[in-house]
Amino acid sequence: MLDKELSFLLISLVLLLSFSLLLGHLFTMIKLPRVIGEISAGLLLGPSFFGYFSPFMQSSIFNGFVGQEKLLSVFYWFGLILLMFTAGFKIPNEINKKDFFKIWIIILGGLSLPFIFGFFASPLFKNEASPNLLAFSLVIAIASAITSIPVLTRIFMDLKMLGSRFAQIVLTSAAFQDIILWIILSVALVIQQGKSYELIDLYDVLYVIGGTVLFVCISLIFLPKILDLLKRTSILRSFNDELIGYTLLICLVIVSLAKLLQVNMVFGALVAGLVIGRLQGLKSEQIKENITNISSWFFVPIYFAMVGLQMDLPSSFDGNLIIMFFLFTSIVKILSVALFIKITKETWLNALDFGMTMNARGGPGIVLASVVFAAEIIDEKLFVALVLTSILTSLISGIWLLWRRDVIIRNNYFT
């Protein structure tokens, strides 16, 4: 019996990985983000396509035995942790002093109006789930303000802009902005877990905020010092293959610490990536590159394919909801960043460069959607709307930067 269950599990993983790699490659060939192809793989294998035409066969493969869904979710969550862990590698460690003011202006623009709009406009978005109303408002506010570091990094790499001042300003701004938003998400999740629709346990909220602050302090202040001491030991003089294992162990330790302090473990994985990202040296860079490759070509494609697998477009596609959420949140985000950056005496088109770029929600937007959907804060229709908005905003940002690249070069945004 165990052999049969293992066969079903392996077949489902083979299908998820092979389809996501193939479609990811095809989408890359036509100059579209790989993540869209990986999600499309899940849509093809899930109830949106395969299950629509052959529900019995689709269910037999992906729900062939009791507990298969839970076993697949292990790969889903591990892929999610590694996605955020490797995203932390890409967050700049240093801020150019001459760009400090511009970065904080972009952070304020990216957070203030989009967050406020999302919070107070949340009743406009239909939601058949029964969440805590405050938790739901916070989630919509976060979804309106979030920016994708991994997608922007990939776009900048493809356009050969990663070493530019413009890219460093945007990525640093997005990093600080998203750290704040992940902390707020931790609060929203603990409010939702209270299972009270009107009353909020203030002690629980203060506990998670205090735990998050303590977690960040321990992770970003003390752990790097401990790792610097370990560099002198025989462990960190090991071969690269061994160091990959130790680095992943550090990631799991930090994520476990986050869980212990009731901090959202997705945020914990991002902080773990920040800790490892601060390690310097040729060997450290090789380890980060190896872990990124393992994640990008195995665990992360399975994660994004499973995001698509969860979507049932024939029954969950609400065109009005998708258009309304996409248009309203995009307009507010783009204009907010552009208006704030105008303070630094940029032209309107230059200001729109920052606004259009910061509107890319990509991976983090999809991660947010999957986390709050699992927490039953949003229903399936809103989950689809958040995922499709993340994809569309990333596409539009990439097209805008492709069009404006030469102008950005002439505007001296290159170091």
Image: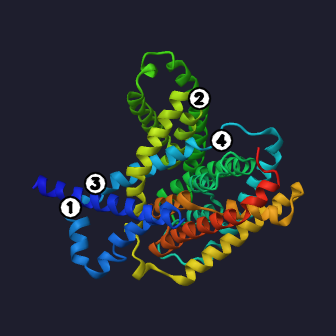
Which is nearer the N-term, disc 3 or disc 4? Answer: 3
Which is nearer the N-term, disc 2 or disc 1? Answer: 1
Q: Which residue is mark 3?
A: 71
Amino acid at dot 4 = Pro
Distance from disc 3 to disc 2, alpha carbons, whole Å, reads 36 Å
Distance from disc 1 to disc 4, alpha carbons, whole Å, reads 44 Å
Distance from disc 3 to disc 1, alpha carbons, whole Å, reads 10 Å
Crowd around label 4: few <14 · some 14–19 · many ≥20 (10 Å): some
Distance from disc 4 to disc 2, alpha carbons, whole Å, reads 12 Å
Amino acid at dot 3 = Leu
Q: Which residue is mark 2?
A: 280
Report whether 344 appears left or right of 397. right
Is label 4 in a helix, a strand or a loop?
loop
What residue is at 59 percent from the left and 67 percent from the top? 395
Q: Which residue is mark 1?
A: 66
Q: Is residue 260 visible?
A: no
Q: Which residue is mark 4?
A: 92
Frontmost of labels 3 and 4 is 4
Is label 2 in a helix, a strand or a loop?
loop
Amino acid at dot 2 = Gln
Instruction: Find out whether the residues at labels 3 and 1 contact each other: C-beta distance under 8 Å.
Output: no
Crowd around label 2: few <14 · some 14–19 · many ≥20 (10 Å): few
Is label 1 in a helix, a strand or a loop?
loop
In which quadrant of the rendered image does the C terminus lie?
top right
